[in-house]
Amino acid sequence: MSRYSHNELRHLLESFSIAKKDYSLSPLSHGYINDTYVVKDGEIPVYILQRINHDVFPNVSGIMANIEKAFLFLESDTYRNISLIRTISGQNYHSHGTDQVTFWRLMTYIDVSLAYNTTENPKIAFGAGKIIGEFHRLLAEADPGHFVDIIPDFHDLTLRVDQYKAALQQGDPQRLQLADTAIQFTQKTLETLKGLDDAQLPLRVCHNDTKLNNILFSKETDQPFCLIDLDTLMKGFFHYDFGDAIRTIVNTAPEDEQDHGKIVFRKDLFNAFVDGLASVGPFLNPLEIRALPMGAVLMPFLHGIRALTDYLNGDIYYKVAYENQNLDRCLSLFNFTQKALNELDYMGESIAMRLAAWD
């Protein structure tokens, strides 16, 4: 259910430079952070209206500046971009209210498009690899230093561990007890990740949240269109985007799956994703390529420790539909982390074979 009435949303639309029509709006519920609505002209979707959650993303102007800079590079026959609709005053977002200000943006809607939370189709996995590769190929000339750090150290393991340790000290005793298995796994896996070193890797402009449902595909052909939800677009390392994609493509179970027997590492989907990446052509150096398998371990673990930290802190970051959903997310992500650890050698061999021409 939407927290805003239909009349409130229609009033917000009047702040943007669009034709005055009797639009209808309906909420999209798959996101954890922002409030998103499809805007329809009759039965035809024409725009996406989104409230930017400034509790999570306080630097709204920085977010929007990053997106506009990226859009200057994301132009090609194989990448279908989204456009921002200006406000009547010419801004790329609208500030609404006085006492409790909310921030809104309006974007074009890509027709006959859809997103998948998970997939069992190698064609979708290939398309995901291809469009993420194209995204990075197009942004390779962008200077990461010109992009604002929206969430500083977003994927920094040291920061996430410090936050986790603070949550351990102040967490609710009952939740600490329920999370004991996750806490033990955290300690064990941190030892494994001690050797991870990204000091020699080049910084890139990264999406930083490349889960499968942040990719739009054609409803008609299953060809990939583009990446969406660019709020976390900022500098990073390619293995962040690689690992984040792997955790939602190679595993066919939902992120909060409680039956861990359904959590899998599908080698055929992994290979298809890397094949899609390879189809774009070289844009990674040998050190980046060698970091990819560990990226597939790091990213589900990072998301897991963030969910665990939020659970211990009382669910203040992620939206939850029931009391222990963050714990379920954490345990599911940690289960896949272990499965990725079990396949480190396989991933390295598959990547080396498929990206051999890049060396």
Image (cartoon, helix red, strand yellow):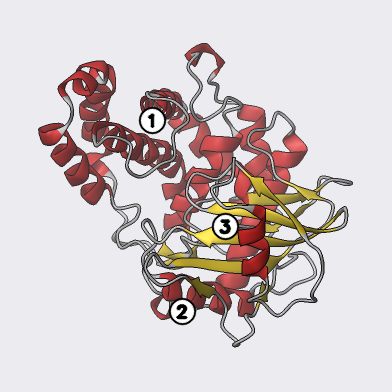
The quadrant in which residue 161 appears is top left
Q: Which quadrant would the C terminus be assigned to in this image?
A: bottom right
Tell me the residue that label 3 is attached to: 229
In the image: residue 277, left or right of residue 262: right
The residue identified by callout 1 is 326
Type of residue at label 2? Asp
Q: Which mark is residue 283?
A: none
**Residue at the spot x=58%, y=45% of the render?**
2
Q: Residue at 66% x, 59% y: name it.
A: 7
SS for dot 2: loop
Distance between the alpha carbons at the discs numbered 1 and 3: 21 Å
Q: Picture coordinates of residue 104 (x, y %)?
A: 55, 67
Name the residue at 36% across, 65% down. Answer: 58
Residue 143 is tagged as 2
Residue furthest to the left in view is: 169
Does label 1 or label 2 sit earlier along the sequence? 2
CB under 8 Å between callouts 3 and 2? no
Query: The disc labelled 3 sits on which kind of residue?
Result: Asp
Amino acid identity at mark 1 = Asn
